[in-house]
Image (cartoon, rainbow, N blue to C red):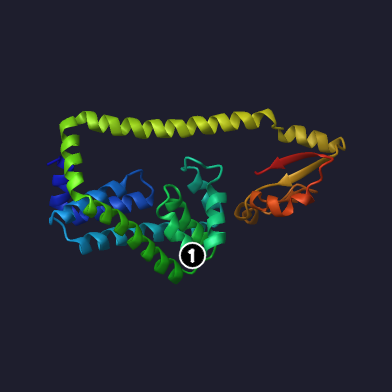
């Protein structure tokens, strides 16, 4: 029996509650693995399934509600801060806002299963003006579905988890090193992809000073403000003569952009 399993059996429901709450607040803790392990212990008759499910769902709801109120009080600017901790900050607001436009409040359930979006969706619900009653109802359902899914996986594969646990115990510290190496490798890969993307952007980048000089000289250019709607509503100021066109509207409104002129896009 591994030390982690012994700890989960001894403190059980408190551990589930604390770890899930910590992850929902934003700490990089893989609570899904804990829920799967708890499901395995449920299959072995060591934990009560209903108490585990309620503990995880309540912790999830508390964390989500905290983020909801942060978004409600802080407004659209909160999303910028939240998205800075995402591995894909360039598309964070756009992806989450697009999901809300398509699915409304029910997108909270889908977001719960997507790493990154699970932290971004609750404050966005607050920013978008969703009522507290609606948010609590849907977020509670999302927490139950999310926790129940991983607990059920652990319960269904309880016997296999015992084999995996024995193997990890044999590896000892080498197993922990392997898991950490995989996580670090994934983060490093995402970081390198982002740096590569930004390098490509620099090839066609123009500084604000260069743009001002071009406009002062009467340059025939078309300026397009591609900020997300939430960012635009937070700071509606726009360069005189520019067209506000979010990336989600490109397909529907692309004819508004003239083809015979140089086009300069900006998003800050």
The picture quadrant where one finds residue 110 is: bottom left
At horizontal 59% and vertical 32% (from top left) the residue drawn is: 198
Q: Does residue 154 appear to the left or right of 66 in the view shown? A: left
Give the labeled residue for mark 1: 105
Q: Is residue 232 visible?
A: yes
Please name whichever residue, 121 or 234, is drawn nearer the observer in this view of the structure. Answer: 121
Determine whether 97 is above or below 259 in the image: below
Count up the numbered dots: 1
Q: Is residue 15 visible?
A: no
User: x, y percentage for residue 31?
Assistant: 30, 48
Please name whichever residue, 33 or 267, is drawn nearer the observer in this view of the structure. Answer: 33
At horizontal 17% and vertical 41% (from top left) the residue drawn is: 163
The picture quadrant where one finds residue 53 is: bottom left
At horizontal 28% and vertical 30% (from top left) the residue drawn is: 178
User: x, y percentage for residue 99?
Assistant: 53, 56
The picture quadrant where one finds residue 21 is: bottom left
Q: Residue furthest right?
A: 218
User: x, y percentage for residue 142?
Assistant: 38, 61
Please name whichever residue, 47 or 67, is drawn nearer the observer in this view of the structure. Answer: 47
Q: Residue furthest bottom?
A: 133
């Amino acid at each position: 029996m591994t030390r982690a399993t012994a700890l989960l059996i001894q403190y059980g429901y408190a551990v589930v509650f604390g770890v899930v709450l910590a992850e929902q607040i934003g700490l990089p803790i893989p609570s899904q693995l804990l829920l799967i392990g708890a499901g395995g212990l449920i299959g072995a008759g060591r934990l009560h399934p209903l108490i585990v499910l309620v503990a995880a769902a309540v912790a999830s709801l508390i964390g989500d509600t905290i983020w909801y109120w942060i978004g409600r009080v802080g407004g659209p600017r909160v999303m910028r801060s939240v998205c800075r901790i995402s591995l894909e900050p360039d598309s964070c607001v756009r992806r989450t806002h697009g999901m809300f436009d398509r699915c409304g409040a029910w997108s909270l359930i889908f977001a719960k299963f997507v790493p990154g979006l699970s932290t971004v969706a609750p404050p966005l619900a607050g920013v978008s003006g969703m009522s507290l009653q609606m948010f609590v109802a849907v977020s509670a359902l999302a927490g139950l579905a999310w926790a129940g899914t991983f607990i059920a996986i652990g319960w269904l594969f309880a016997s296999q988890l015992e084999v995996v646990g024995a193997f990890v115990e044999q590896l000892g510290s080498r197993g922990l090193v392997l898991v950490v190496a995989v996580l670090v490798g994934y983060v490093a890969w995402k970081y390198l992809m982002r740096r590569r993307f930004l390098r490509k952007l620099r090839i066609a980048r123009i500084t604000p000073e260069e743009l001002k000089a071009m406009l002062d000289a009467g340059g025939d250019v078309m300026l397009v403000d591609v900020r997300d709607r939430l960012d635009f509503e937070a700071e509606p100021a726009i360069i005189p003569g520019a067209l506000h066109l979010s990336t989600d509207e490109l397909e529907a409104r692309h004819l508004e952009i003239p083809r015979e002129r140089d086009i300069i896009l900006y998003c800050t």
